Image (spheres, helix red, strand yellow):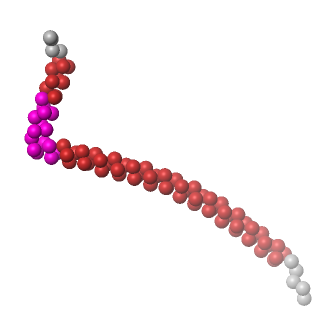
């Protein structure tokens, strides 16, 4: 059986991982890295949720602006009508 460079590299990598898992310091580093990955995943999920909420908030603000704009137009036109009427003397 002839070992090509890739299989030698894979074998060497497996040996390194095996030795690292037996080392308590390396094990702690690996655990910390896994915890960090989980925290980053959780944080990215929360940020995606905030982006969705921001989009909804923008939509609601635009909707309110349209509603307030139409209300102001209706109010100002009714004032013009009352102002146009002559006062009885």
How far from the left and from the top, in percent, is residue 77? 77, 69
User: Dividing the image into 4 quarters, which one contains the N terminus?
Assistant: top left
> Residue at position x 70%, y 67% from top?
71
Residue 49 lies, with reference to residue 12, above or below; the image says below
Q: Quadrant of residue 37?
A: top left
**38, 62: nearer the viewer:** 38
Residue 44 lies, with reference to residue 5, above or below; the image says below
How far from the left and from the top, in percent, is residue 27? 14, 43
Residue at the extreme top: 1
Magenta span contains residue 65 = no
User: In this rendering, would 76 be left or right of 43?
Assistant: right
How far from the left and from the top, in percent, is residue 47? 40, 52
How far from the left and from the top, in percent, is residue 45? 39, 49
> Residue at position x 81%, y 77% from top?
83
Residue 64 lies, with reference to residue 89, above or below; the image says above
User: In this rendering, would 40 be left or right of 3?
Assistant: right
Q: Kindly report the secondary structure that dominates the magenta region of the rendered protein.
A: helix
Residue at the extreme bottom: 89
Magenta span contains residue 26 = yes
Q: Quadrant of residue 29?
A: top left
> Residue at position x 57%, y 55% from top?
59
User: In this rendering, would 46 be left or right of 8?
Assistant: right
**51, 72: nearer the viewer:** 51
Magenta stretch bounds: 15-29
User: In this rendering, would 46 be left or right of 71?
Assistant: left
Q: How many marks?
A: 0
Residue at the extreme right: 89
Residue 22 lies, with reference to residue 36, above or below; the image says above
> Residue at position x 26%, y 48% from top?
36
């Amino acid at each position: 059986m002839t070992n090509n460079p890739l299989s030698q590299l894979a074998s060497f990598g497996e040996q390194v991982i095996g030795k690292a898992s037996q080392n308590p310091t390396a094990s702690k580093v690996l655990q910390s890295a896994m915890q960090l990955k989980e925290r980053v995943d959780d944080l990215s999920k929360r940020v995606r949720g905030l982006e969705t909420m921001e989009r909804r908030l923008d939509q609601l603000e635009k909707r309110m602006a349209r509603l307030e704009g139409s209300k102001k137009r209706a109010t100002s036109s009714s004032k013009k009508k009352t102002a146009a009427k002559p006062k009885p003397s």
